[in-house]
Image (tube, helix red, strand yellow):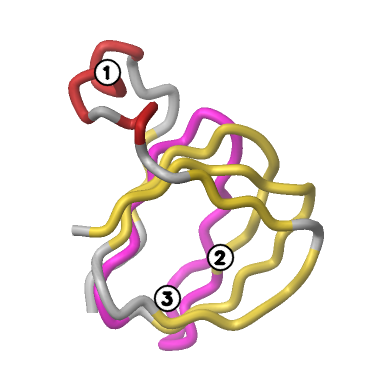
Amino acid sequence: MSEITVEHNISLAKLDALGVDVWPVWTKEVATFDWTYDQIEVCYILEGEAVVTPKDGGDAVTIKEGDYVSFPKGLSCTWEVKSPIRKHYNFK
């Protein structure tokens, strides 16, 4: 299984090239929940912080404001939202 990838401090030029500002926005209050990705998802974290832990024993990943994140298709994980999160997201 592929891993969660995080790019910190992504440039505004790259965000513009990806068209991130027109992607839908998802928000979530402080919570813990399980999730499985049936498609590749890429997202840009606008605010907040979460720890995402793969269920296959992979390393937990902390994501926060300014991070560009890719979740692989087939990933089953637990999200622990530490502070309310808001992100742009897109499926590939």
Task: Report if the CB atoms under discs 1 and 2 are less than 8 Å apart.
Answer: no
- Rendered image: mark on residue 48: none
Q: Secondary structure at mark 3?
A: loop
The quarter of the picture where the C terminus appears is: bottom left
The image shows residue 77 at horizontal and vertical percentages of: 50, 79
Q: Which portion, as a residue range, is magenta?
A: 53-74
| Front label number (2 vs 3) | 2
Q: Which tag is nearer the camera, tag 1 or tag 2?
A: 1
Q: In 3D space, how far apart are the residues under numbered discs 1 and 2 (Cα atoms)?
A: 26 Å
- Measured from the top left, where is residue 48 in percent x and y? 69, 41
How many C-alpha atoms fall within 10 Å of the one at disc 1: few (<14), some, or many (≥20)? few
Q: As shown in the figure, which amino acid type bears the numbered disc 2?
A: Val
The reply to whether callout 1 and callout 3 are in contact (CB within 8 Å) is no
Q: Quadrant of the N terminus?
A: bottom left
Number of residue marks = 3
Residue 14 sits in quarter: top left
The label number, if any, that marks residue 58 in the structure image = 3
Three-letter residue code for mark 3:
Gly
